[in-house]
Image (cartoon, coloured by chain):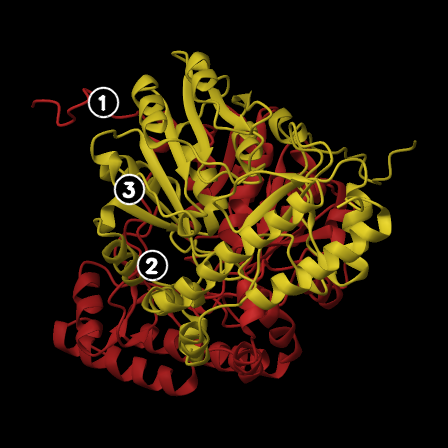
Chain colours: A red, B yellow
């Protein structure tokens, strides 16, 4: 092929680490209908958030945002010091910042799988060596295997707790043991789904300075569109991460709305209660249809539908319900992840699942 | 000092590149008054943006944002293909992504100085070697010096055009020559202040695939709080950058408001006209007071106040006007950067400057 550039110029070569990144293509367009595919809060956000959003002035929109007041509000809510945390452009940025702060090429990163794919992408982008530590068929947290993979080169361990897409949780003692056994590694416990579970390692970093925690406003608080994550940890370690962050990483709408979101715990409580009830109802129905699902502490359920999983996804889509194909995740052949919504949405979901399963002949014996 | 951790744990060491980063501490709290310190649009944002913002539904807030519709709108406005650009979390993220995509440790990065400090920070964070190429006292773009620093290891050249904080511009031919002479380097022309200048290299990347352009909605469009930057360039090169970006990097409010902002060109036109007129009035007054300032194509003026520059900053602050100390930038001893606002704000600014200069005895002979 002749060089298309009259100047004779050629293409730049991206870094190998970037060129070889696995793709991450979550659903990002045409998401019409009941969207049970991204673990969002399907009840929306608190009316207080919407009210605050509608009070925004042209000056607030036009000004670079000040992170400090919102950070103070979050710190107070978490009963930690402002210096022990940092607000980020979603947890995605928190993960990215940890990788950027601590990882050199050839460092080792341990990631129990299956899990949230951004861990691998952000770690691999640094040129570090990503070591996936698989769970067994039970999807229980592979604590012993993780411990056995820790070496002096282990510099980062990324754990979602509760885990996504399985909903499994790790024992706090196992996580602390891992942090103790990997003193050269930053340990991120990503508690994005904390509100559906209720157990936290906060503020264990006061004993273990290599421990970091993430929280998010994207799930239970219903602010996924606004992009606010929380990275918490030992103050001196967080200071290091702050060196790598840009000053205006979180937008002003998010920063204005965070205190309003925190102030409406009743909104969160009601939504979480519906999720917990809906989770049980869905798992019961799946059980009745002979479909395996795993105990979940998140706002979602992973179900092993088997060879018909694409037919289920397609059938639900035809009925206006979006769920997520997770069959390419490690150990998740034939698996579908279904976000739990409000009580009414669960009614619709269960009816639709029953109809589709009948149609495609899965679980029809029950 | 005894180890404060009962577990005997010690602190993690951040990467050298991060530990050694220069600090960047823009004003980020207590910015009460007329804020002429961050080159924001002091007229706010378009009423159409505010109207769109107020229409946001709880579902839009709670959903992960879809970048594609806003990218299509921006691409259409710029008359380029969607694949030739990417929306970013402010230009800060565009800079970061270019560094992450192309820079290996020990690569060379050329940055004409004085300029926007995030270039150095993002480049240095990768471990690359940052080479500052100083302008002479005229602050003219140091094209010849830049060319003389290009080597086979040059992998990135970052140029703000118009430049911040000087307001100076480079000749298009000089920029293209640099891109031609550095075929192994990505060349970013950061046109954040394009609307106050009017000249662009868009879409020159069709001849020179190593050329990238940045635009922003933070300046003339008045959306600094929302965080939307544009990175444009050759489609295959942008594809590489897209591998490094997280899928939900731009928030849903920003994505919803971008088309509304683009639709109100009259708002931009009126604000830019006021800036251009105010820029001349301020420079005329500074000249009358014997204070040197440089020709500016941005929405700001750099003025060499001299040894009394802190007194001027302080005096203006007492009168409720914030301006920016730039005296620590290369070659900017005694310099203050003043954002130009609306006609009325310029009236206030000029009166306040005259009063403060009288008070501190600068320019009193005129």
The answer to which image quadrant residue B353 occupies is bottom right
Q: Residue at x 27, y 61 (%)?
A: B73
What secondary structure is marked by label 1?
A: loop
Same subunit: marks 2 and 1: no
Task: Please report contact status of discs 2 and 1: CB closer than 8 Å, yes or no.
Answer: no
Residue on which disc 2 sits = B67
**Residue A153 x %, y %:** 58, 24
Q: Pointer 1: residues within 10 angstroms few (<14), some, or many (20+)? A: some
Give me the disc on residue B202: 3
Give the chain letter at badge 3: B
The answer to which image quadrant residue B101 occupies is top left
Q: CA distance from mark 1 to mark 3?
A: 19 Å
Give the chain letter at badge 1: A
User: Where B119 falls versus A225 (above or below)?
Assistant: above
**Residue A231 x %, y %:** 62, 52
Q: Residue at x 16, y 66 (%)?
A: A311
Residue on which disc 1 sits = A10
Q: Pointer 3: residues within 10 angstroms few (<14), some, or many (20+)? A: some
Q: CA distance from mark 2 to mark 1?
A: 29 Å
User: Where B5 falls versus A91 (above or below)?
Assistant: above
Q: Pointer 2: residues within 10 angstroms few (<14), some, or many (20+)? A: many
Q: CA distance from mark 2 to mark 3?
A: 22 Å
The answer to which of A218 and B234 lies nearer the viewer is B234
């Amino acid at each position: 092929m002749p060089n298309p550039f009259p100047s004779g110029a050629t293409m730049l070569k991206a870094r190998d680490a970037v060129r070889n990144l696995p793709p991450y293509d979550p659903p990002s367009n045409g998401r019409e209908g009941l969207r049970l595919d991204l673990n969002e809060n399907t009840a929306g956000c608190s009316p207080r958030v919407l009210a605050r959003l509608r009070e925004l002035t042209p000056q607030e929109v036009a000004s670079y945002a000040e992170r400090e007041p919102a950070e103070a509000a979050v710190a107070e809510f978490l009963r930690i010091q402002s210096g022990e945390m940092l607000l980020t452009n979603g947890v995605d940025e928190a993960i990215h910042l940890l990788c950027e702060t601590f990882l050199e090429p050839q460092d080792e990163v341990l990631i129990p799988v299956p899990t949230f794919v951004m861990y691998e992408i952000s770690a691999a982008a640094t040129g570090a060596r990503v070591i996936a530590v698989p769970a067994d068929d039970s999807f229980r947290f592979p604590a012993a295997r993780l411990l056995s993979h820790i070496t002096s080169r282990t510099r980062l361990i990324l754990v979602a707790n509760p885990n996504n897409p399985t909903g499994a949780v790790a024992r706090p003692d196992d996580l602390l043991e891992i942090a103790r056994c990997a003193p050269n590694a930053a340990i991120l416990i990503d508690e994005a789904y904390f509100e559906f579970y209720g157990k936290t390692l906060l503020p264990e970093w006061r004993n273990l300075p290599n421990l970091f925690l993430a929280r998010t406003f994207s799930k239970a608080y219903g602010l996924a569109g606004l992009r606010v994550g929380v990275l918490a940890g030992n103050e001196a370690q967080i200071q290091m991460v702050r060196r790598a962050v840009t000053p205006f990483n979180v937008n002003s709408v998010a920063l204005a709305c965070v205190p309003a979101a925190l102030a409406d715990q009743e909104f969160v409580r009601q939504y979480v209660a519906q999720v917990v009830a809906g989770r049980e109802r869905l798992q019961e129905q799946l059980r009745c249809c002979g479909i395996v699902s795993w105990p979940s502490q998140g706002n979602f359920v992973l179900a092993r539908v088997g060879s018909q999983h694409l037919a289920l996804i397609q059938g639900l889509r035809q009925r206006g319900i979006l769920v997520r194909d997770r069959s390419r995740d490690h150990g998740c052949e034939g698996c579908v992840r279904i976000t739990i919504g409000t009580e009414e949405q669960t009614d619709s979901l269960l009816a639709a699942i029953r109809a589709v399963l009948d149609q495609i002949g899965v679980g029809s014996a029950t």
